[in-house]
Image (cartoon, helix red, strand yellow):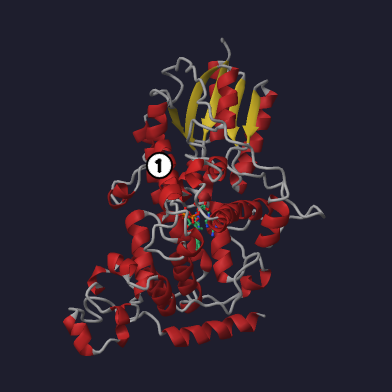
Amino acid sequence: MSEIAIHWFRQDLRLMDNPALAKAARAGALLPIYILDDETAGEAMMGGASRWWLHRALEDLNRQLGGNLRCYRGAAAEILPRLADRYGARTVSWTRCYEPWRVLRDTKISDALSKSGVETIRLNGSLLWEPWEVLKKDGEPYRVFTPFYRKGCLQADKPARPMTDRPEILPCEARSDDGAVALDALELISPIGWHETMEPHWDISEKGAHDALSTFLEEGLEGYKSGRDFPARRNVSRLSPYLHWGQISPNQVWYALDDEAAEDAPAVDVDHFRSEIAWREFSYNLLFHNPDLPSRSLQPKFEGFEWSDDVAALERWQRGMTGVPIIDAGMRELWQTGYMHNRVRMIVASFLVKNLRTDWRKGEEWFWDTLVDADLANNSASWQWVAGCGADAAPYFRIFNPVLQAEKFDPDGDYIRRYVPELAKLPGKYLAKPWEAPRAVLEEAGVALGKDYPLPVVDLKLSRIAALDAYQALS
Ligand code: FAD
């Protein structure tokens, strides 16, 4: 095999079930590469938590590739043609990405490569259905999830079955003068050391992804439909960062639900889990057909909404110091682990956008920086959903009451006690609303409000009424 093929890893950091990688490996001796292209990413540049995850994921990939992964830093549009030329590569492959800036860049790169006689292999490896495959009968994209899923996805061709063979990779001999840099030179890990608190919570590897899936199938899938709303329970998969980085494919997850490990789970749980996977597809569909989803409200009337510019309140939200325990627990879970449970994401987002009336894009920005699963499609679609300005969004009058939400979904207070330990000794009755606790109860629990734990940043009732008024004025 004398031909050389380059596989450009991006958000497909796995060897198994990677159709583009497999095809490139069959085409020739392989040069597996990663390019940190901050130059073209512009505003979509990765946040801190993502960069740390990426570093660890690349370490794992490099290990699996026998140390042959080559890293580069700079504009992919310059690096790829140069490498193809330097190595005399006839083929360059990659797994498609759907972020608008990547779509534009990749098209340009592909055009430039084909002009110089290099074939590009661009395949789907991160979605069950391409965004252009699931459309309404009139050819328009869906804007409402249920018909998207039921009439679109479930009536479309079945997703591709995952490939089960490990690709045979023959590494090509690397040149020392090809501009490659050491992984550390990508400077993905910030010297402030924030990642150290996140590190113990994750096994960032392809194997780690499959272990998370197996654990979920064995311990979490049964009872998923109802249990997924309770942040202290183990009914969610925590697969989101692995799916985002492509350390596992959605096809592997989808078809694992047919396997032995899942066969005892009630159909209602399996179906519900499938529909959540499809929410990810829906977000990608929305982003692909609405490239300004991350920056503009899908419902144009919201662009005129008067947001608050209370920076101090935003900072208290970011730090988990709002004085509202379920909000602070969620924001601290995020900071400490890089993850936040979905129910709590909805509660903290509603609180920011509605009670604090802060622009949803400020919340989106913070999540972008701090989530290990920060994903342009899921993050922007979800923020627009909570803010009520997106497609198929929550109606404006749905304003979560964080106290009732905590009492319902964290009934024993385990989640709040874990992340807000200064309130751990408060009796359950007051845990979600310490400001209502009598002085003696607070004293007994060793809590001085305003000193050990803040008073609420906002009055929940008044801020709810003010939000309803402001939203109503828009309609
Ligand atoms: P599970 O319940 O085990 O679900 C399995 C998979 O289905 C997830 O890994 C995810 O890929 C997909 N999924 C589940 N729920 C959703 C959903 N509501 N929307 C889209 N896909 C879903 N998810 C991200 O992956 N990245 C983000 O940046 C992100 N930002 C969000 C911001 C806000 C304000 C909100 C409310 C939600 C956001 N989500 C985001 C969606 C959701 O919260 C996470 O996907 C989910 O919590 C991940 O945990 P899990 O893997 O344990 O989920």
Relative to 39, is 432 above or below? below
Q: Is residue 87 left or right of residue 135?
A: left
Q: Which amino acid, mark 1? A: Asp
Q: Is residue 7 visible?
A: yes
Which quadrant: the C terminus? bottom right
Q: Is residue 316 visible?
A: no
Q: Residue at x 67, y 55 (%)?
A: 149
Which residue is the extreme one toward the top?
2
The foreground one among 459 and 244 is 244
Q: Which residue is mark 1?
A: 211
Relative to 345, is 106 above or below? above
Relative to 181, is 349 above or below? below
Q: Mark 1, residues whose alpha carbon is within 10 Å: few (<14), some, or many (≥20)?
A: some
Q: Is residue 235 left or right of residue 475?
A: left
- Residue 261: give x, y in percent of width and height: 47, 44
Asked which secondary structure carries label 1, the reply is helix
Q: Residue at x 46, y 72 (%)?
A: 352
Which residue is the extreme one toward the right?
138
- Residue 107: give x, y in percent of width and height: 66, 37
The foreground one among 304 and 451 is 451
Q: Is mark 1 within 8 Å of ligand 1?
A: no
- Residue 29: give x, y in percent of width and height: 53, 16
- Residue 415: give x, y in percent of width and height: 33, 66
Q: Total of numbered circles in the picture?
A: 1
